[in-house]
């Protein structure tokens, strides 16, 4: 409920901004390109967190390297647009295709691993792919733009900000719809069975390998789609911005905040966490002061606060912030105590 | 031939640091089932202590290693007792996220305290070395390797020959049974993490002699600790020692590939790790558990 | 606090001397807002803070004079900073924030080629001029962007000065071993040497690439030792320069010239290496010893004094600081020349700019990068930086050849 409300509020805010009345009223937050950029970022993370949820939340495999699919999607579209001169919208559909093909390929060996081992191996893939993309040469020339990265031509359309926002929002809607479908399908039941007990799932006739690889590829396709949109939106991609390791942690954190295994939770988590990050980073039009802290030290203290918040959320709200504020439990000391008792020694 | 021998020597010497970084990480992972993303940050705290003692009081970096160990032990014990113990029964992702948060806090507190300047400990004997024909063996690196092996031996001794070590082994084998026979879980867990942090502190002291450090310099070491522990195999100190030395060798030979070998350092390391995981999940030296 | 006030006072005094008789009369106009996202936390903190120092030095100076003079009206300046946590993606968000939310009329660059490339696209789409001083990769300037200007010499020039200098030395070194980090900027530096050194009669071994941020470079140094080249060049960053120098000593890699693109010019390099830092050369955008006759702003000596007054205890300003100040100067002069705060007019004035300041000549080619200012070569001699090339602005002779490690 709460998750749905957060997403709905967010999705409604944007179309409003294109109205002239809002523009001329000068309502803060709504009337500018900054909001579009932040909103597009949020939508991008909605896709990634929702996609992660399919493999991490529903199937229970703690994928820690999904940023590889984001980067592969970005580079697929980037290569086609920058090098092969394809129009962007023709190049975009190939991003999820290539990303999911790659996921299926590496999923076959990786998904034989369990628990931490899968997490670590997938993290390794995430790091290695970025490195390969940057450094592979062919006939003495960098194959994928090398360290210089890829520059895509800036799209010459009106309302560029609005266009990419809607595109990314559409991708988020697709991701949420796919999750909704998965949770109501035989496929989804199989994935949940795997999460709860893989051996038992296998015994009752679930083809665990096919299901797991399917879930991994599906997550990769959605993540790759976000990457494809990102490459044209950002105009410039390289290893740094197409394979940022911190996205791995952020998308999982969003899913956890919103509640894993649910349809809307991860997307709502994305809205909350991105807004928090942007707020602490100072990019929201709300100014704030941290008492007793000089301006020079403020960014650093903001990072400390982010870390402390993370620790507090993880310790006290292991079922997600949405659950915490949602209908199932009340904001109370006993809730906190119960959460602590459940997880601590 | 001399080149080959030199590469082997350099690889093994570099492996010393990976051993030191890996044993603490492997202990915490193997016993507590926590993948400690703050490990690299703990390492760098050790580095800053050694640097501070060297630059302010001219204390030889090797002499300050025990200080690193004790300080980090106290910090580690407190962190586990006060914070991490509270989510020990939560799914594994939570430990990832919790330690990621701790990592963020530690790095930025270091940034507030020490700024972003590159710090390095350069004692008068740094850079000196033994020359055996064409092969050079730098003293500092040789001593680092020695310290790393000694630290590993000391850790193995504590784990196998002391009361607390036996308690740690017991909780590693079966937490609930250990509790039934009267082991204080909270204390034993905190001791384990403290010991892991102490090893990280020693590693940090060694690293401050070998490279220049900044508050963010620990992050690559967390990734490398993963690989080292998995290469060797989870659960035994000696396996991590082998893993660390093997990783040093792999890195040295990877770097020596003509042209651009070392730009694929992570791809090679992680590729190897995935290969080991898939074909031999117990690691090169590990026992199946 | 008192120290800071004194420092401000000192800057103001210096400023007053620098501009002679301050013209009287102009009225104070609206405040000009400039903006820059910088990596105040994260992996680029060190360099970002140097950049911020450079910007702040100019901000103090221009405001002490009352602001930028546009058509008889003085506009005070405020520079807004945001922390992009050393992430290029976040840098783009903050650039947009600066433009739309803070109404920044002009932009100053972030630190690093990746963030600069991303931000250049933002500046272009918003048609706001960005003057940057810390993204030297030419790929940024090959995109046909019209609103990005770099005051610094492009990457390909970084180590060419060392080769030019080497060609004048006796006995002339003839072989070059090139180490390079695998990032955009470093590779441009390295590839330029591969094509340039042969024109000076030197042979270059194949470039040995390593991972950006690598801390263990012993195998690379071993490869350099096996090659036994006269000149060992590194194109990377401070951390790797320190690692290479340490490994060179440990592994007894001897060469006639050790030169590193980035690193030796910072005080950290000497602090970290002590005596072992001696004899090392670097290619530098600027040194405190250069001799340029500025058309406005401070002389080199005054600049160094102003820096030390504002940031006591940090030693001489490093070239990152100087080039960042120079970016502000280019923007200031362009605004004055345009006689307007209109983005388009200032852009045109930037494109037509040709002025010499303490940093050297600032003039942009059609792509927007400053190819007209020479790089200088520095050498660390007995723990002190000296400018050794080109000889017309040098303050010392190169100490050549570098003695073997066991003879120091």
Image: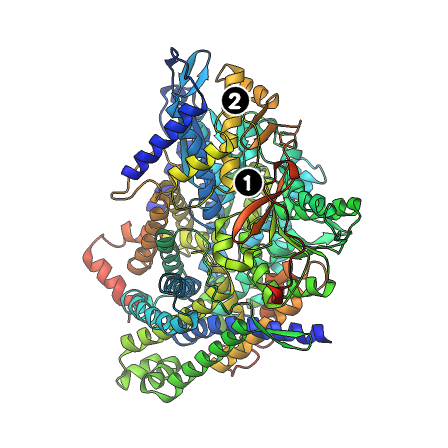
Q: Give whichever of discs 2 and 1 has the lower sequence position.
A: 1
Q: How is the image coloured?
A: rainbow
Q: Could you tell me which residue is drawn at 48 percent across and 50 percent down?
A: C267
Residue A26 is situated, as x and y percent measured from the top left of the image, at 37, 22
Residue A11 is situated, as x and y percent measured from the top left of the image, at 42, 36
- The chain holding disc 2 is C
Residue C127's label in the rendered image is none
Is C41 or A93 nearer to us in this picture?
A: C41
Disc 1 is placed on an element classified as: loop
Q: CA distance from mark 2 to mark 1?
A: 22 Å
Q: Residues within 10 Å of mark 1 (few under 14, many from 20)?
A: many
Give the quarter of the image for residue A311.
bottom left
Above or below: residue C129 compared with residue C399: above
Residue C333's label in the rendered image is 2
> In this view of the protein, can residue A204 be seen by the observer?
no
Residue C61 as seen in the image, left or right of residue C193: left
Residue A81 is situated, as x and y percent measured from the top left of the image, at 67, 39
Q: Residues within 10 Å of mark 2 (few under 14, many from 20)?
A: many
Residue A202 is situated, as x and y percent measured from the top left of the image, at 52, 72
Residue C287's label in the rendered image is 1
Give the quarter of the image for residue B12.
bottom right
> In this view of the protein, can residue A315 be seen by the observer?
yes
Residue at the outermost bottom position:
B161
- The chain holding disc 1 is C
**Cβ atoms at labels 2 and 1 below 8 Å apart:** no
Q: Quadrant of the C terminus of chain C?
A: bottom right
């Amino acid at each position: 409920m709460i998750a749905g409300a957060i997403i709905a509020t967010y999705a409604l805010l944007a179309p409003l901004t294109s109205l002239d009345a809002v523009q001329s009223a000068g309502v803060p937050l709504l009337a500018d390109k900054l909001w579009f950029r932040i909103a597009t970022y949020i939508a991008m993370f909605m896709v990634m967190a929702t996609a992660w949820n399919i493999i991490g939340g529903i199937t229970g495999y703690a994928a820690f390297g999904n940023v590889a699919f984001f980067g592969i999607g970005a580079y697929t579209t980037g290569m086609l647009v920058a090098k092969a001169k394809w129009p962007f919208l023709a190049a975009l559909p190939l991003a999820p295709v290539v990303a999911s093909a790659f996921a299926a390929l590496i999923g076959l060996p990786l998904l034989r691993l369990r628990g931490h081992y899968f997490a670590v191996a997938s993290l390794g893939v995430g790091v290695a792919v970025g490195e390969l993309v940057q450094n592979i040469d062919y006939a003495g020339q960098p194959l994928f733009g090398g360290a210089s990265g890829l520059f895509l031509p800036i799209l010459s359309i009106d309302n560029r900000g609005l266009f990419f926002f809607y595109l990314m929002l559409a991708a988020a809607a697709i991701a949420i719809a796919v999750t909704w479908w998965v949770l109501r399908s035989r496929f989804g039941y199989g994935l949940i069975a795997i999460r709860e007990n893989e051996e038992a799932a296998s015994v009752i006739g679930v083809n665990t390998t096919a299901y797991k690889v399917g879930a991994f590829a599906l997550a990769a396709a959605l993540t790759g789609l976000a990457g494809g949109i990102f490459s044209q939106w950002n105009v410039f991609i390289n290893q740094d911005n197409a394979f940022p390791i911190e996205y791995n942690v952020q998308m999982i954190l969003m899913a956890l905040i919103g509640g894993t295994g649910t349809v809307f939770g991860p997307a709502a988590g994305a809205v909350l966490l991105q807004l928090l990050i942007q707020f602490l980073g100072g990019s929201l039009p709300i100014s704030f002061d941290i008492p007793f802290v000089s301006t020079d030290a403020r960014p650093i203290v903001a990072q400390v606060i982010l870390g402390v918040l993370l620790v507090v959320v993880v310790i006290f709200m292991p079922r997600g912030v949405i659950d915490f504020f949602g209908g199932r439990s009340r904001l109370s000391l006993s809730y906190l105590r119960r959460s602590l008792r459940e997880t601590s020694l | 031939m001399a080149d080959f021998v030199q590469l082997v020597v350099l690889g093994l010497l570099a492996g010393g640091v990976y051993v030191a970084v890996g044993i603490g990480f492997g202990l915490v992972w193997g016993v507590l089932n926590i993948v400690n993303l703050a490990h690299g940050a703990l390492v760098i705290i050790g580095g800053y202590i050694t640097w501070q003692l060297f630059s302010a009081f001219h204390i030889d970096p090797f002499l300050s290693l025990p200080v690193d160990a004790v300080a980090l032990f106290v910090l580690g014990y407190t962190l586990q007792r006060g914070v991490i113990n509270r989510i020990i029964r939560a799914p594994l992702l939570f430990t990832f996220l919790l330690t990621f948060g701790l990592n963020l806090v530690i790095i930025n507190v270091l940034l507030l305290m020490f700024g972003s300047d590159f710090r390095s400990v350069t004692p008068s004997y740094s850079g000196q070395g033994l020359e055996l024909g064409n092969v050079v063996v730098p003293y500092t690196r040789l001593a680092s390797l020695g310290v790393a092996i000694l630290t590993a031996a000391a850790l193995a001794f504590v784990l196998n020959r002391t009361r607390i070590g036996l308690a740690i082994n017991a909780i590693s084998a079966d937490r609930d049974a250990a509790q039934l026979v009267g082991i204080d879980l909270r204390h034993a867990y905190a001791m384990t993490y403290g010991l892991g942090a102490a090893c990280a502190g020693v590693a940090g002291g060694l690293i401050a002699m070998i490279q220049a450090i900044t508050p963010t310099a620990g992050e690559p070491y967390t990734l490398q600790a993963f690989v080292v522990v998995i290469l060797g195999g989870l659960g035994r100190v000696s396996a991590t020692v082998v893993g660390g030395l093997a990783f040093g060798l792999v890195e040295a030979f990877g770097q020596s590939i003509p042209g651009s070998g070392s730009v694929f350092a992570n791809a090679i390391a992680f590729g190897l790790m995935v290969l080991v995981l898939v074909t031999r999940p117990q690691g090169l030296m590990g026992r199946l558990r | 606090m008192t120290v800071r006030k004194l420092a401000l006072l000192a800057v103001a005094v210096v400023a007053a001397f620098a501009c002679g008789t301050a013209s009287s009369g102009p009225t104070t106009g609206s405040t000009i807002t400039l903006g820059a996202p910088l990596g105040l936390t994260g992996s680029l903190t060190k360099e970002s803070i140097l950049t911020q120092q450079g910007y702040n030095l100019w901000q103090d100076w221009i405001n002490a004079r009352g602001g930028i003079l546009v058509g008889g009206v003085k506009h005070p300046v405020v520079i807004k900073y945001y922390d992009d946590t050393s992430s290029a993606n976040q840098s783009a968000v903050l650039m947009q924030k600066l433009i739309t939310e803070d109404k920044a009329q002009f932009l100053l660059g972030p630190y690093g080629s990746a963030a600069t490339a991303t931000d250049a696209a933002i500046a272009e789409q918003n048609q706001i001029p960005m003057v940057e001083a810390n993204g030297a990769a030419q790929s940024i300037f090959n995109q046909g962007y019209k609103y990005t200007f770099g005051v610094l010499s492009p990457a390909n020039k970084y180590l060419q000065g060392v080769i030019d200098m080497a060609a004048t030395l006796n006995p002339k070194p003839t072989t070059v071993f090139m180490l390079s980090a695998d990032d955009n900027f470093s590779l441009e530096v390295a590839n330029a040497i591969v094509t340039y050194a042969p024109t000076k009669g030197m042979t270059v071994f194949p470039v040995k690439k390593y991972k950006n941020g690598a801390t263990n470079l012993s195998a690379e140094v071993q490869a350099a030792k096996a090659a036994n080249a006269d000149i060992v060049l590194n194109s990377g960053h401070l951390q790797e320069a320190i690692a290479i120098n340490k490994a060179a000593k440990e592994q007894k890699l001897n060469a006639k010239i050790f030169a590193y693109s980035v690193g030796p010019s910072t005080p950290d390099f000497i602090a970290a290496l002590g005596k072992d830092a001696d004899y090392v050369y670097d290619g530098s955008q600027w040194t405190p010893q250069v001799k340029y006759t500025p058309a406005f702003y401070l002389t080199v000596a005054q600049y160094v004094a102003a820096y030390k007054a504002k940031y006591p205890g940090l030693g001489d300003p490093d070239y990152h600081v100087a080039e960042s100040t120079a970016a502000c100067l280019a923007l200031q002069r362009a605004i004055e020349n345009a006689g307007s705060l209109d983005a388009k007019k200032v852009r045109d004035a930037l494109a037509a700019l040709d002025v010499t300041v303490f940093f050297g000549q600032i003039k942009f080619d059609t792509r927007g990068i400053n190819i007209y200012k020479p790089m200088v070569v520095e050498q660390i001699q007995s723990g002190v930086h000296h400018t050794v090339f080109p000889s017309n602005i040098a303050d010392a002779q190169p100490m050549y050849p570098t003695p073997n490690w066991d003879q120091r």
